[in-house]
Image (cartoon, rainbow, N blue to C red):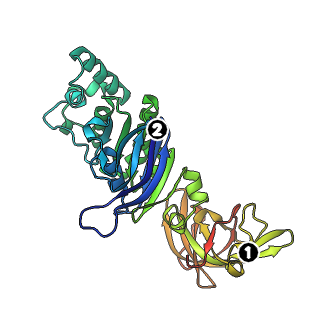
Amino acid sequence: MSLHVNQLCVRYPGCAHPAVQSVSFALHTGDIGVLIGPSGCGKTTLLRAIAGLEPIEAGDVVLDAQRLGGAGAQLPARQRRVGMVFQDYALFPHLTVEKNVAFGLQSLAPTAARARVSECLERVGLADLRQRFPHELSGGQQQRVALARALAPEPRLLLLDEPFSNLDVDLRERLAYEVRDILKAAGTTALCVTHDQLEAFAIGDSIGVMHAGCLHQWDDAFALYHRPVTRFVAEFIGHGVFLPARLVPDGAGVAVATPVGTLRDPQECPLPDAYAGGVCDLLLRADDIVHDDLAPTKATIMRRAFRGAEFLYTLLLDSGHTVLALVPSHHNHAIGDRIGIRVEVDHVVAFAKDA
């Protein structure tokens, strides 16, 4: 079932500013969307409005050509056939796994309900634990029970609110991939809220970055990382810094003068007249900076974070600016060491100075 959110606004009583402002996006049938952003950005409020749990001030929500809600018209949540997995799973502690999953199937005949429960438990890999109680399960298993319970009534849309936040860090990304496989196998259209970028990249076909109630960009993970459309998206996604730069004509192409050296003839680059005097702020990710002892540009290591296969170095340039660099961990330099660096950028991401 396809989901269309059109210019949606949600405002809490007594608040001067809306919690969600003019948000629009589309989610195709069978796709998984993710809303990501800092705390208080409005992503959970948006999810609850789609579920019918928050009133809509303006705009509307359309699911498979049916208008679920809008200004002055609200289809009750129970009639939307929209499932929801909550942050704390909300399992019934006094019911077994089997009975938790069967909870929303009262309208089915007992035989059909049992078959549906078995199908869902098989899908999430918990068929052997059907007689266990929630307290006898690990956090990851409880999360799967909540997912199976939400899938059992065959919702037209599944909403997941921070579904992995209660799990260990090492488990989150792996479980996100597993949940994606389960949803894809079921053909379920889903929308998930998270604050964790790795979870978003692992589970989402499309990802929306929100800030202060606004949706800045709705795109795939590659585009968010390499082609952010706003400065906030550029700063929020991945590790990166902005350096002052100037775009100048260079023969038939464009060169970019930066404190790390001049980039010549990048494959994708704004024209010099895109900014007044060609002056702009250039986004450099940690993977744009290459450690090269033969490079003429030197930088001093200010901080280092060991990440197993690599170090994340924070480097101070002679200009006083800082950059980040991911360096293979066998290059084990100490804080205060000076190393050579160069820039490798295929396409230039730049914004107006101090935008």
Determine the residue positioned at 31% across, 61% down: 11
Q: Locate the C terminus by quadrant.
A: bottom right
Determine the residue positioned at 74% across, 77% down: 296
Q: Locate the N terminus by quadrant.
A: top left
Image coords of residue 9 (percent x, y): 37, 57
- Identify the mark nearer the N-term, 2 or 1: 2
302, 289: nearer the viewer? 289
Number of numbered discs present? 2
Disc 1 crowd rating (10 Å Cα; few below 14, some 14-19, many 20+) is few
Q: Secondary structure at mark 2?
A: loop
Check residue 273 in the rendering and tell me which mark sits there, or answer none.
Answer: 1
Image coords of residue 332 (percent x, y): 57, 67
Q: Within the image, what quadrant is residue 174 found in?
A: top left
| Amino acid at pointer 2 | Ser
Image coords of residue 217 (percent x, y): 52, 57
125, 332: nearer the viewer? 125
Determine the residue positioned at 47% across, 58% down: 209
Q: Circle 2 sits on which residue?
A: 2
Q: Secondary structure at mark 1?
A: helix
| Amino acid at pointer 1 | Asp
Disc 2 crowd rating (10 Å Cα; few below 14, some 14-19, many 20+) is some
Q: Within the image, what quadrant is residue 125 found in?
A: top left
Left or right, residue 65 beside residue 234: left
* In this view, 31 is above or below 260: above
Q: Is residue 162 visible?
A: no
Check residue 297 in the rendering and tell me which mark sits there, or answer none.
Answer: none
Determine the residue positioned at 21% across, 30% down: 103
